[in-house]
Amino acid sequence: MTTVRTRFPPSPTGYLHIGSARTALFNYLFARQHGGEFVLRVEDTDRERSTDEAVQVIMDSMEWMGLEYDEGPFFQTQRFDRYREVIDQLLESGHAYRCYCTPEELTAMRETAMANKEKPRYNGYWRDRTDTPPEGIDPVIRFKNPLDGVVVIEDAVKGPITVANAELDDLVIMRSDGTPTYNLCVVVDDIDMAITHVIRGDDHVNNTPRQINIFKALNAPLPVFAHLPMILGEDGKRMSKRHGAVSVMQYAEDGYLREALLNHLVRLGWSHGDQEVFSLEEMKALFSLDGVNKSGAVFDVKKLDWLNQQYIQSASAETLASGLTEQLEKMGLSTASGPDVAVVADLLRDRAKTWLDMAEAAKPFYQAPAEYDAKAVKKQFSAEAGERLQVVHDNLAALSDFSPASVDACLQDTVAQLEVGFGKVGLPLRVALTGNTASPALDQTVSVIGKEAVLQRLVAAVQYCQTL
């Protein structure tokens, strides 16, 4: 039985795009679902735009997403001798030829075709010529595409797609400087790496008939082709920077869990009943090309936020503590002298959409407010509020037990002592401790921040109120 082998072949010309990440995920899941192998291939033949930094971004993105590949990374620039060997084979078998057309001649061909209201393309001038080539011109090598008949793509997602060979011109498979081109390299790689399933974005549909003809010219078995629907922004147009972050590592930087991003990606163009939340193990078990939709899928940031919140709420204490610690460290905040991070994370888990949200909410647990929110000050701070905060300070200072229950009882007694509503004490206290009026339950917030830090912040807040 043939082993299923898929591949993910990014070009290292920038960040790893969300669309590419979805392609990587689908290839990974299909391989795992069938007990097969997943290959990473770096298509770096665009020497001008490919960079080592972009290669590292690909590696970092794959590692962060947890998409472990079985082979690779293979680099196309290290396989040029193999591509030239295959090109020589195509020349010898009559499936390729040298073309000596100048750029000016090619431009004239296109202009003539357009003037005749025909598709602008190469007209096959050097296809069957036997006369002596002109001197001083380094030829390109073109693939001799069949002139008649059709190519049928048995697409596993879109169904059969038929393209007439007459619609395809003789594409260049080697440039005049000796470098092979994309369509040739891809086919040779897929043959040599025994790829059984080519799962990629439907922007590649136009390349597929050309590649199928090269497979046939090399007497190689065809892989199964599956073209995935485009990822769209919420306006229905192809996703781009104008729709927000499109880089995988930007989502990591913004505090999303990889599980949430993978979950959102798998639902972009694939479904399994009405299920919305999938663990990676469930994805591996359930994924199939039969479940992939033909139409474009919308990347919905609100849906991603919701998913991320689900994962945060269900995460283990260890995962929460690790994620929050990492984010706080990125902000330059040390947790060494503050409360247990796991306790703080658990306190905030129901309020946070991302690690970034959680870290922002966690700041007051590890540092006193550098300043108070102007609106909060205007509403909650006054000389009278300062007097009440002094009473709160004195009552909390007398506590030997600083548990949430003890703190709550103390605050209730203080409210009764001052003969005011709880808001007259609670809201100024929140501002004193956090800088604004938003925080988890006050008794828990006070308890977790800790007695010494709470008393210091109350002293500072009382002094601030005395200046108003």
Image (spheres, rainbow, N blue to C red):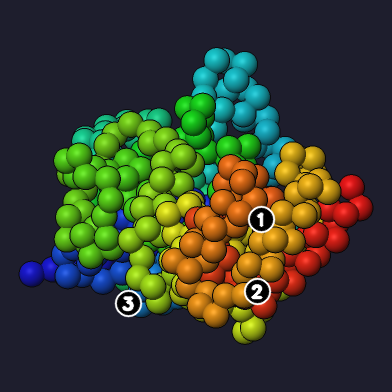
Q: Badge 2 is on which residue?
A: 397
Density class for disc 3 (Cα within 10 Å; few <14, some 14-19, many ≥20) is some
Per the rendering, the mark at residue 380 is none
How far across and how far down the image is residue 365, in percent? 62, 68
Specify the farthest residue to the right: 467
The residue lying toward the viewer, choosing from 13 and 204, is: 13
Q: Badge 3 is on which residue?
A: 70
Kindly tell me whether residue 142 is visible in this rendering: no
233 to 68, vertically: above or below:
above
At 48% from the left edge and 72% from the top edge, which residue is drawn? Answer: 403
Q: Amino acid at mark 1?
A: Leu
Specify the farthest residue to the left: 1
Per the rendering, the mark at residue 429 is 1
Report the quarter where the N terminus lies: bottom left
**Mark closer to the observer (1, 3):** 1
Kindly tell me whether residue 415 is visible in this rendering: yes
Q: Image check: 260 left or right of 276?
A: right
The residue lying toward the viewer, choosing from 217 and 310, is: 310
How far across and how far down the image is residue 188, in percent? 38, 64
How far across and how far down the image is residue 78, in percent? 52, 76
Density class for disc 1 (Cα within 10 Å; few <14, some 14-19, many ≥20) is many
At 69% from the left edge and 50% from the top edge, which residue is drawn? Answer: 428
User: What's the distance in space between the residues labelled 1 and 2, CA to CA?
Assistant: 14 Å
At 53% from the left edge and 44% from the top edge, which residue is drawn? Answer: 126
